[in-house]
Amino acid sequence: MLLSFVRACLSFPALPLLLVLAGLACLRWRRPWWGRSLLALGVGSLWLLSTALGAGWMAAGLERYPALVNADHLRANGWQAIVVIGGGRQVAAPEYDGRDVPGYWTASRLRLAAELYRQSSLPLAVSGGLGPYDTEPEAMLMAHSLVHDHVVNVRWQEAVSRTTDENARELRRGLAPQGIDRIVLVTQALHMPRARLAFEKAGFVVLPAPVDFVRGSASRTPLLLNLLPHPRYLTVSAQAWHEYAGLLAYRLRYAFD
């Protein structure tokens, strides 16, 4: 519980808000220089990272891999499977009679995976387990969506993992006996560096197939509009912040494995 609280405080946008509170406290304690500095840092960072320009800067260090736009050659080049890892669910969706369904991030990954499947005919693997209050593994939701929404087949379901690292380890345990070690990995562009690191650590050779790029959206609008805050960009910056922290944590963990 304490670790989760500390992690939440160090995340975005909680951290800028804490800087604002610290600035107000310094002003109350008659530390005007510290108070004004912390207030400016907190409000300024919250504003900047809520804009298209700020979100693009945050994404720049993570969106390293180009989109995979032509999958016809994948089988000929020795790639053996398409792997999709879970990215969250919509719980008890009323429009689907109260069933859990893939959330936005997961649905976006599945859409690209289905397209790659049609182009390449490579077999599909989905990975995702149970959260604390879930009753159906995410892999089952993903497989159901691929079969019924996208009309493609799913060969493997890994329904135990709860983190990206566990996705990689559990899939390796299931696919290695079948000689599968060269995979096309589908996930968000922001998440791809951490996901690729985990899957390569597990023993896979990975071809990234990222989706949902952030960079480029700012170039299509005037600079003034790029500096206006929007909830979408706040979400992007928060996700990027999470990925930087996760990437650092994975690198430190793997360095001592």
Image (spheres, helix red, strand yellow):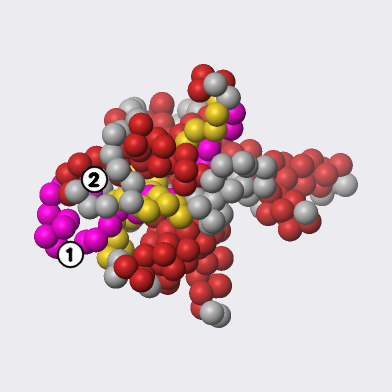
Front one among 38 and 98 = 98
Amino acid type shown at disc 2: Tyr
The residue singled out by tag 1 in the image is 78
Residue 120 seen in render: yes
Secondary structure at numbered mark 1: loop
Front one among 200 and 176 = 176
Secondary structure at numbered mark 2: helix
Estimate the x, y position of residue 233 in percent, counting from the top left: 48, 35
Q: Earlier in the sequence, mark 2 or mark 1?
A: 1
**What residue lies at 41% left-to-right and 27% top-to-bottom?**
224
The single residue placed furthest to the right in the displayed view is 29
Amino acid type shown at disc 1: Gly
**What residue lies at 11% left-to-right and 60% top-to-bottom?**
76
Give residue 115's quadrant in the image: top left
The single residue placed furthest to the bottom in the displayed view is 256
239 part of magenta stretch: no
Whole-angstrom CA distance, mark 2 to mark 1, is 15 Å
Seen in the image, is 163 located left or right of residue 35?
Answer: left
Position above or below: 255 against 91: below
Quarter the C terminus occupies? bottom right
The residue singled out by tag 2 in the image is 117
Main SS of the magenta segment? loop
Front one among 102 and 227 = 102
**What residue lies at 35% left-to-right and 30% top-to-bottom?**
149
**What residue lies at 47% left-to-right and 66% top-to-bottom?**
169
Front one among 89 and 211 = 89
Magenta-tinted stretch: 68-92
Residue 50 seen in render: no
Give residue 2's quadrant in the image: bottom right
Q: Residues within 10 Å of mark 2 (few under 14, many from 20)?
A: many
Position above or below: 79 against 95: below
